[in-house]
Amino acid sequence: MVETGFLRHVHNCNRWNPVHFYAFYVAGEQVGRVKRPILDALQQWPEWFEITEDRVSLSPRLDGFNQRSEALTIVTGHLVETGVISHRHGEPYPVTTGNRQPVYAKIDRAAAPYFGLRAYGQHLNGYVRDGSGLKLWVARRAVDRRNYPGKLDNLVAGGLPQDLELVENLHKECWEEASIAADLAGKARPVGALTYCRETRTGLKPDTLYCYDLELPQNFIPINSDGEVAEFYLMPVQEVAEIVRGTDDFKLNCNLVIIDFLMRQGILSPEHPEYLQLAQGLHEKI
């Protein structure tokens, strides 16, 4: 039987135990956390990693963004080849402390959780107002996706690579995922950022999601072009709320984005018994 309620999604996105991790430092700053299998694997590069009983540090001899990035690229490639890391994604992610700046190095997106690095994403709520009320466009992920195949998703959702600015990446994702042209995507309103920290079998995901709302024309029909989406649905917002409350049909972090939307629209009101816990839980300390 599936547990119900909105707050469980916040709890599911924020389950982790610090004792399972060793701090990861770059340039004297803690940027992530690693589990034992990664720590053990890194011992074969003593010229690049300094390991003590409670932390692993990228060597200060790697001076500057380019040297650090090159070392991490070589290490990541070897760890993929030996099966320690599952795959390469092909997008560069920034190595930061808690903000997007300063950037100490770059690393492949797929490797970021193995090092417990903060990842950044952008999620967009595409909604329509018509005579019958407020409706949300919902995507269903293709069944061949590596992560969450077949799950429901926000209309537009994607990672934020190191080499793209927020507006540039949002427009790219809007076009690839839903064929939203730049002039329409430019009307998207930034509405805040959500944070969470979740332990996985192989690492840690301390993620930040920049959120946007975009009111779409009633005649707009999304079309996917990058193969990530199997189909789209235009649903009454109350139906979406009930799916989030009562099922696990949505990709895990998308539940948080929808809960935030429901609260801002007054659909999840302050009278709801979980309201204050939700408000706090959507913004875990970075």
Image (cartoon, grey):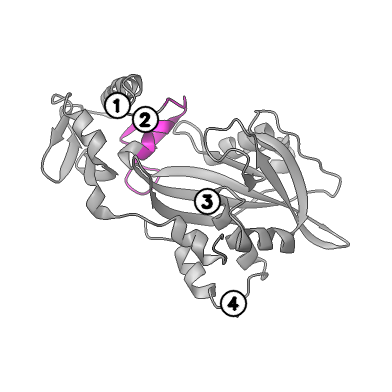
| Label 3 secondary element | helix
Bounds of the magenta segment: 87-113
Q: Residues within 10 Å of mark 4 (few under 14, many from 20)?
A: few
Residue 166 sits in quarter: top right
Distance, label 4 to label 2, CA atoms, is 42 Å
What amino acid is at disc 4? His
Q: Residue at x 73, y 64 (%)?
A: 238
Q: Earlier in the sequence, mark 3 or mark 2?
A: 2
Residue at the disc numbered 4: 272
The circle drawn on residue 72 is: 1
Tell me whether circle 3 and circle 2 mark residues in contact (CB < 8 Å). no
Q: Residues within 10 Å of mark 3 (few under 14, many from 20)?
A: many
| Label 4 secondary element | loop
Residue at the disc numbered 2: 107
Q: Residue 146 at what x, y percent from top left?
A: 52, 32
Tell me whether circle 1 and circle 3 mark residues in contact (CB < 8 Å). no
| Label 2 secondary element | strand
Distance, label 1 to label 3, CA atoms, is 27 Å
Distance, label 2 to label 1, CA atoms, is 6 Å
Distance, label 4 to label 3, CA atoms, is 21 Å
Distance, label 3 to label 2, CA atoms, is 22 Å
Tell me whether circle 2 and circle 1 mark residues in contact (CB < 8 Å). yes
The circle drawn on residue 253 is: 3
**In the image, is residue 35 part of the stretch drawn in magenta?**
no
Q: Earlier in the sequence, mark 4 or mark 3?
A: 3
